[in-house]
Image: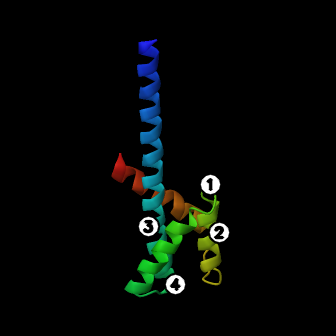
Amino acid sequence: MEKFDERKKSFEKKFAHDEELKFKVASRRNKYLGQWASKKLGYDENKEKEYIQSVIKADFQEAGDEDVFRKIQADLKGHNISDDDIRNKMKEFNEKAKSEFI
């Protein structure tokens, strides 16, 4: 029974670590996405910082990435940026963020 408890604790630790890593990667991706979108929107440095925070906060509305996608999509409406462009940037920045943590 002791080995089972040790194994259970080990799995719980790994799960917690993996979830924390996912959170960090997603937050970093959202930061990069916010920087990219703010440049497209022509924001100055102060407005860019506020905008990045709003993108990061948007990710807390629901599980998954669609909340962030919808925010960026709505903000960039009228700037000639397609949904595919946004999704490609999300993938690109996700890979960049992953490489920084792994």
Please indicate, yes or no, whether residue 17 appears anywhere in the rendered image.
yes
Sequence-wise, the earlier of marks 2 and 3 is 3
User: CB atoms at circles 2 and 3 under 8 Å apart?
Assistant: no
Sequence-wise, the earlier of marks 4 and 3 is 3
Q: Amino acid at mark 2?
A: Arg
Residue for point 41% across, 56% down? 97
Q: Is residue 86 left or right of residue 48?
A: right
Q: Amino acid at mark 4?
A: Leu
Residue 19: percent from the left, percent from the top? Answer: 48, 44
Residue for point 47% across, 52% down? 23
Task: Give the Cα distance between marks 2 and 3.
Answer: 16 Å
Between circles 1 and 3, the one closer to the viewer is: 1
Q: Nearer the viewer, residue 4 or 66?
A: 4
In the rendered image, which residue does mark 4 sit on? 41
Q: Nearer the viewer, residue 90 or 6?
A: 6
Q: Amino acid at mark 1?
A: Ala
Which label sits on residue 63?
A: 1
For mark 4, give the secondary structure: helix
Quick check: 14 above or below 56?
above
In the rendered image, which residue does mark 2 sit on? 70
For mark 1, give the secondary structure: loop
Task: Give the Cα distance between marks 2 and 1.
Answer: 13 Å
Between circles 1 and 4, the one closer to the viewer is: 1
For mark 3, give the secondary structure: helix
Q: Is residue 86 left or right of residue 17?
A: right
